[in-house]
Amino acid sequence: MSDSIDINGAAAGLFEPRITAFVCNWCTYTGADLAGTSRLHMASNVRIIRLPCTGRIDPLFIIKAFERGADGVIVSGCHPADCHYTSGNYHARRRFAVFHDIMEFIGVDPRRMTFSWVSASEGAKWRDVVNEAVTNVRALGPFAAYRALAPEGAGRAAPAGPSAAAVPASAGAKAEAS
Amino acid sequence: MNELRELARTLLTDGTVRVIIGWEDARRGARPAFVTDPADADRLIFDTRCVHNLVTYLDPRRDNVAELGKIGLVVKGCDAKAIAGLLREAQLNRDDVVLIGVRCGGVLEENELPAAVPLTPENVAPRCYGCDNREPALVDHLLGEAQPEPPRPVTTIDERVAALDAKPLEERWAFWTEQFGKCVRCYACRQVCPLCVCERCVAEKTRPQWIEASAHPRGNMSWNITRALHLAGRCVDCGECERFCPVGIPLSLMNRKLQQIVGERYGYTVSDDPENAAPIGDYRLDDKQEFIK
Amino acid sequence: MSRVGVFVCHCGENIARTVDCEAVAEALREHPGVAVAEDYKYMCSDPGQALVKKAIEENNLTGVVIAACSPHMHEKTFRRACDQAGLNQFMCEMANVREHCSWIHEDRGEATSKAIDITRTIVEKVKHNRPLESIHIPVTKRALVIGGGIAGIQAALDIADGGHEVVLIEKEASIGGHMSQLSETFPTLDCSQCILTPRMVEAYQHPNIKLHTWSEVEKVDGYIGNFEVTIRKKARSVDEDLCNGCGDCQAACPAKRIPSEFEAGLGKRTAIYVPFPQAVPNIPVLDRVNCTLFKGRRKGLKKDACGKCKEACLKEAIDFDTEDTFVTEAVGAIVVATGFKLYDIGRDQPEGLKGYGEYGYGEVPDVIDGLQFERLASASGPTEGAILRPSDGKEPKTVVFVHCVGSRDPEKGISYCSKICCMYNAKHAMLYKHKVHDGRAIAFYMDIRAGGKGYDEFSRRAIEEDGAEYVRGRVSRIFRDGDVVKVWGYDTLSGEQVVIDADMVVLATAMRPQDGIRELAQKLSVSTDEHGFINEAHPKLRPVETNTAGVFIAGACQAPRDIPEAVAMASATGAKVLGLFSADELEREPAVAVVDENTCIGCMRCELVCPYGAIEQREICTVDGHVCGHVAYVNPGVCQGCGTCQAVCLSKSVELQTFTDEQIFSEINALCYWE
Amino acid sequence: MTHAAPTRETYFISDDDLRALTGELLGAGTEVIAPVAVDVCASPSAIASSACLRPGVKPIDIEYRALEGAAELDLSRGLPVLSLKQYFLPEYEALCGWREHGIEVEIDAVPTEFAPRVVLAAKPCDSAALAVVDKVMNWDYQDELWNGRREATTIVNMACPVIDESCFCTAVGTAPDDDKGADALLTPVEGGYLMEATTDKGRALVEAHAARFKAATDAGGAEQRGRQAAEERAAARVRVAANLEIDAASVRDWIDTHFEDPLLAALGVRCNGCGACSSVCPTCHCFDIVDEEEGIGKGTRRRCWDTCQAPTFTLHASGHNPRDSQNPRYRQRINHKFSVYPLKFGEVLCTGCGRCTRVCHAGQDLVEILQAIDVAARRPEVAAT
């Protein structure tokens, strides 16, 4: 699929999504290394944060990434049965299943959250996961809805009445929600 | 009710317990009662207004309750599930509390009434519908007559969740951002939750501060998502979080959705069996992973 | 205030071609908390490292970030450099701007800004790194070897000769394993017994080797350097100290028609027996399943139905009432050498395997497997080395050897090559021709895999000198037809169907891991592959280690192996163990979880998810010593640093050092995409 | 306490004129805040609210809101869920922003000037609360943000028509028709309202819209209206007084001298420490200051509501907590409101709005508690033993 999409969006003047990836050290991070040593070209929108194991990844990481303006996230680790720590990814799988479902219930488009198993030998798969995530999120546009939750900072005028919470944010979000 | 008062009197008199935590009638309706003197046993009541999940008073962090001495606690079936939760998570020794179970036919949604009224589809607490534990097993004494099933509320929680699920993503987002937007971060939901017993809530951890402290929509969003996730597979659906919320956020919808998720994915339902291990922290090799590439 | 040094490597042209390294250094100079940022052609070179060391000393840096290749490549290099410059090595991190950036992007602008982002995140992480000291764990300098085959014996001998005590356990009555069943070994055709027996005896008599036969691993506690292993000594009914191996009991035993496992079912044994004459130790066991006395007891007979062996034993070594006993051994390292079993293609199959009903194994007596042929060909075997077919004891004039029965046949559930069959088939054909000069040896093969010193020459000899006939193709059906065994095959070279009236057929059945391997793996918390072979830590670089520190693997428990390979692996594990035992204390990276006892409420969710059982509940006491609660405790010796405990901790009261919440939070924060 | 004295210049404004006035203010771009009846069943939340889904009376939320049009004005309503406090001390507000450049730190200040705005039909217990909190906000430190909003705001009270079993303003020195902390007071009468301007800001409002007001004496039926107003206001005071009467001074002194008294020491047993009472309280003004980082080396310092009912409120860095259980924490609430503050500033830190009692589903009842303390205070010999 990677060939079918334009991995260089800027050139094509497309929206450039910002994607934060949380990957395990033993499979996906190494798989991404392999993609590098194999010179597999891919979209440059993804920023990797290395963790020992998907078992270490807390949904709070993803929420924080969205808070910081990420348009999408990737969570990736060892395939079932391949976990370097034997079962970290099984626990992660349950945690993220619940997180995935509840975020969808809240109204977050699941296509903003890519979960994948990428082994140390799957450099090509990593390339595809990255490109696919970029294509999906690019299609969805910026995650304006989440950014609309941001409070008035000091730079901007402080809220006069009751916190911007109740009315404006949700109104804004409604318009921009993904 | 006399049965309850009699038992309370006996337990207090023979020193089995030092305090009975139940319900009493007060100026603004039923409320939690702390009876230490056998003479006061007649203050105790149990009727459709006795909504409170008193298990929250067993929070090991509540030193001022512990100071009262050994506790005799009156529990409904749903409350007993919370007891099981505390046992499951090593927050309670079963021997440290005498559990007085009451057969329950459901409670009112709005309990601040001068006198008990019979349940109708209009006034019944929606969560009571389909209750699977109206006669708690995990108790030392089980009181009261067998009760009829609570009436079906005009709208069930499941129907409300379904209605929400049926809406497009944008509308669900608008809905929840409006709801969470109202949050003033008083943490009443946490304080009354019988299972929120952390010494230091993650919301109060400052290094790092995962959850922003001020009540802006962004901090409220992460707080409310986190609160819900922390209760996945643990929530006993006592509804106290929603009832105590001063701004009326429909937390029971979040909680119910989580119950549905762990139910559908892992076939898990919360029960008052302490051996029924929670689904998060457990796994099966063949867990569904359709959302993973 | 942090003073971080950032060092951007060009990696020759590897990074500089697509990433503007000067620009990255420039951008990082402005970054809060960065004291110095430089770029250089080859950071990993001596001058490059010198540059880092110099910067540390001159700016007295609190942290170092090397923007270069993957940490998997050079993290150790640069941490060592920092250490030498007096900066705690764990204050150094690498930003991967090569594999994750310059090599996968073309647009210089994009690549450069991404490289800046990547470096920023790591700088932010390093700001929250803490100086850490390696963990020191005492080492019990005793080893446990599981399995008394050639691999186990070799490992035990190497470790014992290295001067350390070894506990060797074997589930059968004697050590020796499959090698003791073999007739002659390829490619030299030297007698298996003759080379193995001395090793068995040496192991038995070695002052440093403590042997438990008829024993199995019951339970494994602890961790590298400090295992506590509980061993089940199955009731033998014979006192190992009193017995002198005279054999009178066997002679006296009335149950003489029990198929002998050692003879692969071709020979018989008694109920109380020594598996084979050269058994080590030469002490019988009583097979309670087949013993008349125990059969009687199971039926509930008041009076014991037999007792002849006991009467016959002058040493009074026999006791019918012994129970299984348990011994615990404290060891610092464990070598797993449980070997293999043959794919029992006849009878009902384990999950995923289909068997070869069409080959008539188990129904046609003259269809046998490789091990049975070994026994026929063995001078000490049931036929004293004469090749006689099981059904009528006649000398077979036409013998068909079928390769790859099970192996390389995903259809039948096994995709791998069993590796030794090509060689032993050639050997079998040879042995047969040496003994039956006018016989025909016909082998059906897929292709000949004879990699190994002298192997190809050997298999050619079978064909060219000994006249074995090799047919390239598969056998579709084998069945009895009167006196002969009909073999339907297909010659893919001539493209013709081949039908052979054979007197005997030898199937080269696949090698499979031993029964109970998964249970054992679980006890050792090591993982197994889909077939049940134990996974090595790294297929190339750590072939005899497992993911559980202190547990090593030798021989066919890891994959099909021939004798020289098994022995080589065994000696490799020996070297690993001796290396582990060379120091009194073990040094480990401090990437372990630590509990904050002030906020932990001891709900023990972490204990539920810990794959290593590293977490236990611990009481905490007030200053005056009375218990005031319980909290989780992480044993740094057992913890492997996956961090799953931290993710499930509701109050975030457990921190994985080197990947703390603050570090990760800062990384995410560094990727703030505002304005 | 200030009572509506007929001597003060009083005007009459008809219902229509009041709406017209509101329209003029809005037209001029002035923010007008007033109690608004929010039809919760109109919002998307309806699908979640079982109350909306069942037949019969639909629930109404009353909130102080910035009006979008004069039509929204609805002066007949009871007490809003949240007090007026949030318009002067928002749930959270930025104090300053910071950005690091290398080792330099740049501070962005926040504006302390606010556009003029008007609050219509404020509840007397809410305006009085502002006057009480003014004291602490201008004690050793002048709180610019608070004062800025106070100065920019003209508050017009409405004599309170809706009184329930939790109201006790008269017991703590205010009244349902008090103008304390306000600039003017409206009293509903036949056909409109009597309006008394009590401050320059109040008078300025009248002058700016002189056309809308008639001197009460000029308007027809003046006398009868005056009587009606006086009677209804008196009746309201009586209704409140029936809920609770205490001697605030002796309560203050008794608490001060009976810190360890079992009565005070055991108040928190049923309290969940949720702090909802502080959130809805018009006088609770404690806040926490947090630095919220957004990206590297930049962020915003905010203050947000805090509550003495939370353990973290007094948690020391050492881990020690002087108020280590809900008993001392609840005693603090009582002590601060009814003794410490009065002793320091001469005013009770409570205006008897009763919100804390209404919001508490655990049944902490301030009316009941004050009653008990009052009894003890009136019978010192009992308390002493």
Image: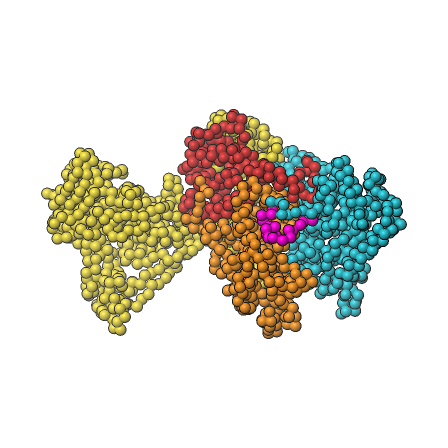
In the drawing, does residue C482 fall left or right of residue A104?
left
Q: In percent of the image, x 67 and y 46: which residue is there?
A: D38
- The residue lying toward the viewer, choosing from B217 and C431, is B217
Vertical position of residue D143 compared to residue B132: above or below: above
In the drawing, does residue D332 fall left or right of residue C380?
right
**Chain A drawn colour:** red
**Chain D drawn colour:** cyan
Residue C294: name its quadrant: bottom left
The reply to whether residue B252 is visible in this rendering is: yes
Specify start and end residues of the magenta stretch as a single range: D45-62
The reply to whether residue B11 is visible in this rendering is: no
Residue C186: horizontal and vertical position, in percent?
A: 22, 43
Q: Which chain is the one coloured orange?
A: B
Q: In percent of the image, x 67 and y 49: which residue is there?
A: D61
Q: Is residue D60 magenta?
A: yes
- The residue lying toward the viewer, choosing from C513 and A147, is A147
